[in-house]
Amino acid sequence: MDKLTQYLSSIKPYRDCDFIDRLNSFYTVIGTVCFAVLVSGWSFVGTPIQCWFPAYFKGWWIQYSLDYCYVQNTYFLPFTKSMPMKNYWDLIRNPIDIPESVEKREERLIGYYQWVPFILALVAVCFWMPMAFWRALNMHSGISVKTVCDMTSIVEHVEPLSRQNNVDKIAQLLDHSTVLSARLHGRNLFTGRYILLLYLAVKIYYVINAIMLFFMLQHFLGVDDSFWGARVFYNLVYGRQWEETGNFPRVTICDFEVRELGNVHRHSVQCVLMINMFNEKIFLFFWWWFAILAVLNFVNLLCWIASIIFDSFNSSYVISYLEDTNARLEMSENEFLLNVQDFVKTCLQPDGMFLLRLIGTNSGDIVSKELVNSMWKRYISRKKSNPKQLDDDQSMSEENEPILQNYGDNNNNNGPFTDDSASSSREDFKESSLNPDHLHPKRAVNLHANLKIIIRLKFIHLMFFVDSFLRALTPHNDDDLVDRVNYYYTPIIIAFFSLTLSAKQYVGQPIQCWVPAQFTGAWEQYTENYCFVQNTYFLQLTNQIPVDYVERDSREIGYYQWVPFILALQAFLFYLPCLIWRLTNWYSGISVLGITNMAVDAGNMDYETRKKNVKTVAQHIRQSLYLQRELSTNGKLFGFLIYGKHYGIYVTGLYLFIKFLYILNVVCQFLILNRFLGAQYTFWGFEILRDLAYGREWQESGHFPRVTMCDFDVRVLGNLHRWTVQCVLMINMFNEKIYLFLWWWFFIISIFTFLNFFYWIFVSFNQNMQVNFISRYLRVSDKISDTLPEQRRVGKFVRRELRPDGVFLLRIIASNAGDIIATELIKHLWTVYDAKQNYPTPPPVQSKKNMNYDKNDQSPYKEEKMPLADSN
């Protein structure tokens, strides 16, 4: 429950987007989840369907029919050809007979009501995914948009002096990141506009998503026109009810067949779908909501595109915040406008303008004005110190060189950023560890009660296991996004499915059987419990029940009892490689998780905090890599591990091994699914989807059958009596949807994991890639040039100082913490290395056996061994 609360609390309206984005990623998701929970509770716990049965139907026949009619499609048939307009108590004058042809009945089938919870869950995921990618990918710009926006929201409510100090810190960070991006990536399409282009991609996705879901509802509900929502609303306003229109009918007809005495009997019953009353309101709301969202998203996208294309919009936006500045009063109008245009182009750039607009939208004009003024002062100060560079419009690296040289000289007041978070991180960083004898009614009741107790105990144990497993699931920063999809998001999805099926299977009624009329209630309960714990077999209704028991056994399906446990096992297998990584990477002597946590610390926005963290991380990396080189490879039990550490490839090799385990795990998951489900196809995910697309139902294909046969023997008066009953497995309706989704999910994960594995192999063992990666950051810091001798020095630095493990750690830090931290960390490591090369360490002191000691030492100092001074 704590984990569920944590997940729900993570879905909240952050300030790293505008109001239209929050309508999509927060309010729509919350509303959809609420509707899904409502419909799921009614469908899985309540009674979503009730039918009018013949008087001779037994209670268990009724329950069997209800379960069958819910998992199988029903069809709508109006009562009369023309509805009475005034007196509803008149007898029906023109009744419509039930069609005799089965094909005509199937043309009227409606079966969407079983899928409603799954479709609503899919809608919620479609609206949540773009914001998840936005928050995961904007970090690669070196700026945490969420942290900046959260900081400005805090700054908005503090006193003016403290607010100004912290605004200066934000301006310093944005200014530094702009220069760093230009020098690191050069002039290309993404320079200075990476965040903006990523945000526009999210905006485009929201437009496509709303339109796509708008038409998906039409296909899902099986309506003919795209404006069915307006038509349903019109019918409701003018009093045309579902009896006349057929929209979300409450009363339908259900046909089902039962084997009795070797014959197949068809029954037709009339059912009321109360759940359709809610479905009508829910889908009518979503039709209008998607239409409104599509319009709002499209208009909002055009507004953001216009702010990019037209520079005059950006200049006017900045000028509105610089109206009363002293710098404007000192300049002429034309000079001021030229400086503003250059300020927007070279200092702010598209990413800076985007962040200013975003901050203004969420935190108000006060913070935006102070932030623009702070960045304007920095721009004017640089222009006065280097007017020639700015006037000549030279490269970005030359114009902003003073920023990199003098960065961090001002604004040492931490404001809301204190050293507590950094110091606590450093402290943590330094410390880092069934066979009844007789079927008597009383005995049957006791047996049924015992079975219920056993089943509930199993469910309780499973719940404890899943709860403990969920508590251990936490995303970390010592890996990449593909790893987190494998060990975090996938187990969460599978564990959710496991809990859902467990609740339905062990608390509800997973199976209902059509038993003979002479069976008592206790016998019926015994039969259903036995048929659930024992395997049943699928047989098409057109086929005769085999006389040979061996043939019946060959048709058995028994996976439905094990589904929650298999899902729990699959979730654990996805987490297992991560567990191995956590338990073994410390053996390298490098605290991978500790240094990455310090690198992504939100306090790193403050220069002094970042400087301390960079120094601590660099010192730990340098000392760990040095100790690895000093390890001997002889006489060790696990010599191959020591060998890997000695040559600096232990962490890299271990990480690649974990990547390989993820690939192996996905392949094994496919094999488990095929073996467990007994599928007829190797790629049964494709085949089942094709069967559903071509209308090939389970009665024909046999995939996840809803109706099966069950044989059981009972001892009566010393003789064995065999009974054969027909059962409906409602749980298989959910199994079909879950495993179809999981198959495709595993297929997509396998592709990304496979590509990611070979990417890491290439960048980890290709020395040119390692040298280019380090050189790129050193050139930004002006530590090296592009000459051949300098490149050779970098190659020597990579081979002798960093080695594969050091480069791997820097790549992980760059991918999780951004370019700013990576640049300063590589710069610090290079500075220490370069100093050692210019001022080499003195030769070691002579060993003890070659030392001569002064025999005239006084007695208090006799134990202190000092070498004699040179007599010459």
Image (spheres, helix red, strand yellow):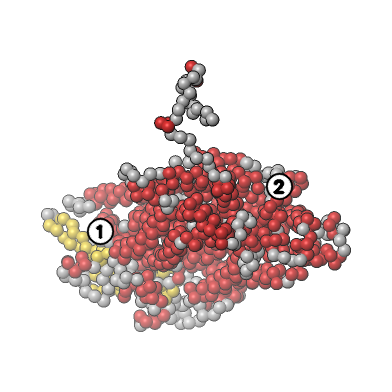
Side of 230 relative to 395 (left or right): left
The residue tagged 1 is 534
Looking at the image, residue 45 sits to the left or right of residue 790; the answer is left
Asked whether residue 495 appears in the rendered view, the answer is no
Q: Quadrant of the C terminus?
A: top right
Q: Nearer the viewer, residue 26 or 481?
A: 481
Q: Amino acid at mark 1?
A: Gln
Q: Position of residue 821 (x, y in %)?
A: 59, 52
Amino acid type at image mark 2? Asp
Q: Nearer the viewer, residue 592 or 205?
A: 592
Q: Camera-side residue: 832 or 168?
A: 832
Above or below, 226 relative to 595 = below
Q: Residues within 10 Å of mark 2 (few under 14, many from 20)?
A: few
Residue 5, given in percent of the width and then of the height, sits at 51, 50
Q: Is residue 672 visible?
A: yes
Q: Residue at x 69, y 48 (%)?
A: 408
Badge 1, how many Cα within 10 Å: few under 14, some, many 20+? some
- Residue 409: which numbered mark, if any? 2
Image: 266 above or below 50:
below
Left or right: 416 in relation to 857: right
- Residue 139: horizontal and vertical position, in percent? 58, 57
Residue at image location 39% in from the left, 82% down from the top: 104
- 338 or 467, nearer to the observer: 338
Q: Residue at x 83, y 63 (%)?
A: 336
> Comparing marks 2 and 1, which lies closer to the viewer?
2
